[in-house]
Image (cartoon, grey):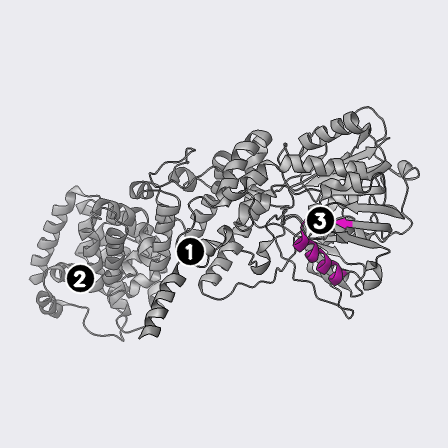
Amino acid sequence: MALLSDTRLLLRKVKDLRCLTPRRNRVKEKWAVTRTKHPPTSLALQHFDSTYGVQLCQLWPSVRAALLSERKYGALLNNFCHDAVLANLEAQGCRDFLRDTDTEAQPSLEQESEVAADDEASGASISKKSDIDGQQLSPLHLSPHIKCLVFPRGDITRFKPARPDMCGLLGYYLMDAASLLPCLALDVQEGHNVLDLCAAPGGKTLALLQTQCIGFLCLNDASVSRTLRLRKVLDSYVPKPLLTDEKLRITSFDGTKWGDIERNTFDRVLVDVPCTTDRHSLMEDDNNIFSKIRTGERRKLPQLQLELLMAGIEAACPSGEILYSTCTLSQIQNQSVVEQAIFLARENHGIQLQVVDLRPLTHMFRKTFHFAPDLHLGEMVIPHVAANFGPIYMCKLRRLT
Amino acid sequence: MGTRVAARQVLRWTGLNATSVFSPLQFGRCLLQPLCIGCRLLCSSSSHNALRSTQHNHELGPQPREPVPELSLPSLVDMGFTDSQAAQIHEATSKLRGGDAAQHALSTLTALFVLGLNPSSVLKLLEKCPELYTVKESQLQQRMGNMRKLGLVEGSLQRVVSHYPQILTVPVKTVKSVVVFLREKCQFTVQQVTDILRESPAVVLENMGQLEYKFQYVYFRMGVKQAEMVKSRLFRFTLDEVRCRHCFLERRGLYQTPDKKGQTVILNPKLDVILSVDQDAFLAHVANAPAEEYEVFSRLLAREWREEERQHGSIEADSGDDDDDDDVEEDEETGGKGGYSKRRKK
């Protein structure tokens, strides 16, 4: 008898474990009877309707429909894998968007532009005549050896998951094809030291490694768990000899401190900052930055982005290049951050920055992506139902001093 | 003798209906020929016994093998058909199988004439729906009577039958179940149900589950009430059409589901503005979008629905898209999520 009453008491106690459950775990979707009244996805949608409705005007309904529909992926080919992946994928109907462009390069200009030695390389530079004042735009240099297959415009076929080859390496990495543009624009050249300040989960890193011309690659991400994920991705795609300490370094420090850690060191810096990830925030309730509990974090994002960009600028060497990219449409997180960084770099550190024109890039890939027209600083891929890539914002800076 | 009485009865009957669409003269002419049939019809609407007794007077005895004289070309022409029309009917009926086929065909033709349709309409109708030839006369009468009871009086009934003759091939029980569904589950008024039957008679042949889903979608998801549904002739359109146009507008931000109080932040376009226009007009004036966008969107949507249905059928949707996406992740401060297994919602 005594035993039973004890268990009953015990059960009563056990039923109420709310005080012991951490706040973030209190409502588990699989147990909850009703959904939250205002899920973060609808809060995000409301927020975007008010900001982007004004910012994008006529374009917003089309972008909104695309963001709420299924996204389109591209297959980044793994050059380290030996299977006939390219042929297989092309048989399904996709094309390498890096080569499937409407180039208008005239024959006379081709002599002046640098042509990559390897014909298969996608890094052919193109000189373009500016329509406005007859001046030549600076030649377009892209990181070489990157290949990415996408299905044509309007084709909504999905990619099948990649299969490992005999060495256990996967044939391709599925990612948003627009995320490759920052890697291309970074223009990694032979022997460069490259820093990726917010590397996880690893798509852009993988693309950089495909160029096979990096001298030394530093990867950092503030979160330990995400860094682990980055390592797993690299292990699945890159052969072990290329992941040694002489070629690669993975760290989990706070990226904003890099100005103090390694100043004036890197030829190329990629700053792919954390942002409101518009597409994810509209579709997934899990890990959504628009949850009420993360409001503070979201408000501080522009500040964090600015600090990361400043750190990247300081870490770059003179005449080095920094590429800032986000996956949001918001002006506050995009142009404003870059403008402030340029200003602060000059004021506080005496660093002169030049904005590198990315118009040749957008012109080259206008067949595959929709670009936002008339951005005064940087370039942006906007989603469209027929080409549901992006949103991606990128801006390239060159250190003059 | 009996036939003369019957003839007078028929004329009186047509006289009663003189106020309706057709003229008694035209009527009298087509009816006087197959008078026996006419009086048989008249009697059948009153009592079955009379029917049996008048059958003696019938030329149309139980002679299944012999070609029925009334269906011959001259008799068809006498009914009011032109030569070519008569030939078409003759050909159609000669293809019919079954001993009573010709009998049914004749009764059908007569019934349609009694209804007041002119010969060319009758022909078009029968071409649309050759099954009508095989419907038994009693069933035909029953069904027409049921229609009348439901409120499809003269004028409407003719219109419905000529536009959608299949409605006469549907048993009364089915029609009744649809009506009960509309009245009780969907809370349409009697008048609204009549309107629905008049405007969208195809509703009687539609799958109940689909009908219910369509109603619920429009009522709850679009926030449209019964009166507007009837006005926009909702039941003429398929679920997919309605859903596709609605979702396109919704995702563009032009349509909002009303909240509990029925309010929306924006002004939703009316249902008949959305549905009743053709696609080009819809895209140009309501959605403000190019055709290419709508076309790709409808394919994406169709795929989404297929997968949703599959999931509801409690079969796991094919998770063939195990993609790592670069830009999905954001900075995680908590790190405590390591224990959870993240299930990405597709």
B306 above or below A371? below
Residue A221 — which label? 3
Mark 1 or 2: in front is 1
B198 above or below A60? below
* Furthest residue in direction right, as rendered: A111
Q: Are marks 2 and 3 on the same chain?
A: no
Across and down, in percent, residue B149 comes to 18, 52
Q: CA distance from mark 3 to mark 1?
A: 34 Å
Query: Of the residues shown, which amino acid type is indicated by label 1?
Result: Ala
Mark 2 or 3: in front is 3
Query: Of the residues shown, which amino acid type is indicated by label 3?
Result: Asp
Q: CA distance from mark 2 to mark 3?
A: 92 Å
User: Which residue in the structure is indicated by mark 2?
Assistant: B37
Residue B290 seen in the current view: no
Query: Of the residues shown, which amino acid type is indicated by label 2?
Result: Ile
Choose between A327 and B161: the one closer to the eye: A327
Residue A81 seen in the current view: yes
Choose between A207 and A368: the one closer to the eye: A207
User: Which residue in the structure is indicated by mark 1?
Assistant: A32
Q: Main secondary structure of the magenta part?
A: helix
Q: Are marks 3 and 1 on the same chain?
A: yes
Q: Is residue A134 left or right of residue B300?
A: right
Chain of residue at mark 1 = A
* Furthest residue in direction front, as rendered: A2
Q: Crowdedness of circle 3 by 10 Å Cα count: few (<14), some, many (20+)?
A: many
Across and down, in percent, residue A147 comes to 78, 53
